[in-house]
Structures are given as structure tokens and as C-alpha cells.
Image (cartoon, rainbow, N blue to C red):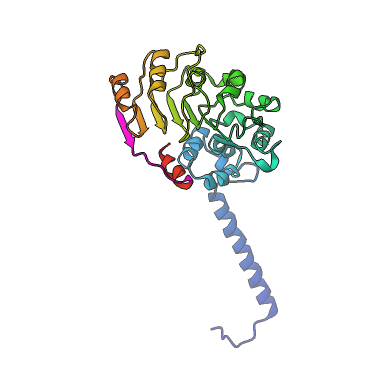
Amino acid sequence: MFHPNRHVPKGIELLGSVVWYRSKAKIKNILKRDRPETSASHPYAGGLPQELVEMIIANIRLHTRTLKACSGTCRSWYIATLPHLHHTLILRRKNRDRDRGGLMPLQKLDKMQLLPFVKRLRIMHCYVEPSLPSEIFSAKCLAYFSALTNIQELALDRLDLHLFIPQAQLYLGHFMPRLRSLALMRPEGPHSLLLCLIGLFPNLDDLKLVSNYSWQPVSREPAPIPHSAPLLRGQLTLAWFFGEDLLRDLSELFGGLRFRYVNLVGPEGSRFLLGACAETLETLRIHPTYRIGRRGYSQRLSFI
């Protein structure tokens, strides 16, 4: 029997170490054979079918952080995350850099060839002052707009219709086949020009109009002929607008109203809409009206 305090010869100790390390190496080789072979150039995630990858990514499309992490996994996952990471583009006018402030996102996305992935476009403060031309709607920006070929939802804030309508088809004409939703926040101009802009998109379903407190329809002018008659069979949202003239003009020019869902701030116009959309209307929601502060104003528009 081996005694723990007894001295072990160096030769036997060395032989035991060699046998132990060789046995350890053999065990590692056996375990390696049972594992799938992976390498840096062929990651295991890249071996999944692309259809399955797209289904996985679609389930996490609302989690931006997770999407960004997945985009760095491999090429197939990067391709699958692109449409979800770049589906929305918001352009803001920045007073500190009037020449380039609103164009920086366009320039970056165009340089990376990501503009075709954008489906929702929102332009904030289109015209802050009539005397100052918007850098977003300028000659140097026209090339970027032509690359936005898949826009389905468009929102324009503080749009001066008198200044914009002459060049509307130049910048937005290629949106016509795919645009389904149009939101106009605090537009300035008469109903005739507003209807002309709406009639530019033949497949338009959803219409959202939010007016200023002090906005009043300008006196009637000869109405230009709309480019087309939109479908207008989705959702209508009207907030702080005055009078039913706009609704009557919509119905007359576009062959009736076919909205299924209607959101109104205040009951004004509800009676006319109930009659005009009697065959299609499914839901009518009327929100209370009252004057509130600037901060509360944005909160009340959360449903829009």
C-alpha cells in the first residue's frame, strides 16, 4: 500500500504526468467529434435558412437594441434586420445649421444605400417662415427624394401649400403608386390646394389632418383639378378643424367617402360623416375639445 509520506521517485512522477496529459488530450478529441464544426468564416447562425431568419427577426422588430445586436451576428442576419432598422425616417429643421441640419439623415442613408428601405417619412417644420425657403425641399435634396422608392406613410408638418404645391409632384410624384397614409400637421393654405395635394395619391387610404387653433379656411379660389381620385377607405383623423366644407369637397371631388374608421376631436362633422360613410363606417370615435397648453397639446394628439 502506498503511504502518502513516502518519497516517490522522479521517474515515476514524470511518467504519471505524461499518461495524465495524454489521457486528457484523448478525452478532448472525443468530445470535439460530437460537436458541430464552426468557424469564423462560416458561423453556425449563417447556416439557418433565410426564411427562418426573417421570421425570427420579424418577432423582435419592435426592439431596436436587439435588432442592432442581431445585425452584427452574420451577413444573413444583417440583411434580415435592415428593413426593420431603417423603415422610418424623420427629418427635422435645425436652426443652428440651416444649410445642412435637415439633410444629414438623408445624406448618411444615401451613402450607405439604405433609402430604399424607408417606408415611413416624416418631415418636421417644412416651412417655419414663408420668407425662409426650406432646405429639405431644395434642388440638392431632389436626388435623395428620388431614391425613396418605397414610401407608404408620409407626414408633413407646417406645410405652406402655396409654396409647396407647384413642386409637389416633382418631390412626391414617385410616391403615388405605394403611398397609403398621409398626415398633414398644421397646414397653411386654402381647401383647394389641400385637396390638390390629397388627390396626388390614387391609392391613398388613411388621411390625418391636424390644424392650428387659429387656422381658418382661406376664401374659396378656383380649385385645381386633382391628379386622381384617392380610394380613402381606411381611417380618417380630424383634429381642430373648422367647418364641414373640407369634408363636402372631399366627397364631391373624389366620388364619395368610404372610410371605415373615423377619429374626430369634437363632434363637428360627425353628422355629415355618418351619412357619407353609412355603407362602410365601422368605428366612429369622438374626443373632447378644450384649449390646453403646448405640452398638453402633444399629449392629446397621441392617438394620431
Range drawn in magenta: 282-294
Query: Please, which residue is most extreme toward the bottom here?
Result: 5
Q: Taking 15 as reference, is 285 above or below it? A: above
Which residue is pictured at 53% across the width and 19% down the height?
Answer: 176
**Residue placed most toward the observer, 299 or 151:** 299
Q: Taking 46 as reference, is 175 above or below it? A: above
**Residue placed most toward the observer, 234 or 1:** 234
Q: Quadrant of the C terminus?
A: top left
Residue 288 colored in magenta in the image: yes
Tell me where residue 17 sits by quadrant: bottom right
60 left or right of 43 in image: left
Q: Where is residue 84 in the image (x, y as percent from the top left)?
A: 53, 37
Q: Where is residue 167 in the image (x, y as percent from the top left)?
A: 62, 20
284 left or right of 99 in image: left
**Residue placed most toward the observer, 274 or 30:** 274
Q: Position of residue 135 (x, y in %)?
A: 67, 31
Report the label total: 0
Residue 43 colored in magenta in the image: no
**Residue placed most toward the observer, 45 or 128:** 128
Which residue is pictured at 62% across the width and 41% down the height?
Answer: 42
Q: Where is residue 241 in the image (x, y as percent from the top left)?
A: 42, 30
